[in-house]
Image: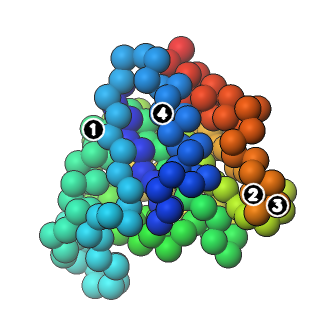
Amino acid sequence: MKVLALLGSPRAGKNTDTLLDEVLRGIKKCDSEINKYQLSKLEIKQCIGCYRCGNTGECIYDDDMKKLYSEFNKADVIILASPLYFNSVSSISKLMIDRCHALWASKFICKKPIIDINKSRKGIFISTAGAKQGKDGFIGAIKVVELFFKAANTEFTEELLIDNTDKISMVNEREILKRAYNIGQKLCE
């Protein structure tokens, strides 16, 4: 099983990254190859809406998204971990997601998909929020992630949404870490 883990937080080692690592720890129990990227360390230019991908099936830019397109293609599981910023994914995550318009355009407009559209992929979304949100507070992020997974031919199968982390250091609580670990381990079944 090939796993692509995308950390959309600018803060490595903090809440979102801790949960991502715990999911990956659960996945490591099975035969898996894990590639983890911290999006803030990659060169990803912003989509400028030039629509070249709609005409050619390819993005105009030659940056680290080319590597990610290849990783999307190989992955059996794609995990996006992003903190909640203004009820959506972080700007770093959204930058990467916007550049996935090339995946969508190559598939639906040009009919020359740049990723294997016959391959079955599972998608997991992990998100943390400092304020108390409840499930409804994550709706904006979930909608964005649903479209991202759809563009990447990925079935949205699991989510781990943890709020109120400013008040309590919840992500380090045993129950939450166990939930994260179990999400990863479940993929091995």
The image position of residue 56, as x and y in percent, is 18, 69
Q: Splitting the image into 4 quarters, where does residue 65 fall?
A: bottom left
Which amino acid lies under the numbered mark 3 shown in the image of this protein? Lys
Whole-angstrom CA distance, mark 2 to mark 4, is 21 Å
Q: Are the residues at dot 3 and dot 4 in contact (C-beta closer than 8 Å)? A: no
Local packing at callout 3 (Cα closer than 10 Å; few below 14, some 14-19, many 20+) is few
Q: Are the residues at dot 2 and dot 1 in contact (C-beta closer than 8 Å)? A: no
Residue position for label 2 = 165
Whole-angstrom CA distance, mark 3 to mark 2, is 5 Å
Q: Splitting the image into 4 quarters, where does residue 141 fall?
A: bottom right
Q: Are the residues at dot 3 and dot 2 in contact (C-beta closer than 8 Å)? A: yes
The image position of residue 117, as x and y in percent, is 33, 42
Q: Are the residues at dot 3 and dot 1 in contact (C-beta closer than 8 Å)? A: no
Helix, strand, or loop for circle 1? helix
Please tell me whether mark 2 or mark 4 is closer to you in this view.
Answer: 2
Which of 40 and 49 lies nearest the eye of the viewer?
A: 40
Residue at 36% across, 24% down: 32
> What's the mark number on residue 74?
1
Local packing at callout 2 (Cα closer than 10 Å; few below 14, some 14-19, many 20+) is some
Residue at 71% across, 61% down: 129
Residue position for label 3 = 167
Please tell me whether mark 3 or mark 4 is closer to you in this view.
Answer: 3
Local packing at callout 1 (Cα closer than 10 Å; few below 14, some 14-19, many 20+) is some
Which amino acid lies under the numbered mark 4 shown in the image of this protein? Leu
Whole-angstrom CA distance, mark 4 to mark 1, is 17 Å
Q: Earlier in the sequence, mark 2 or mark 1?
A: 1
Work out whether 173 lies above or below 163: above
Q: Is residue 163 visible?
A: no
Whole-angstrom CA distance, mark 2 to mark 1, is 34 Å
Residue position for label 4 = 24
Helix, strand, or loop for circle 3? loop
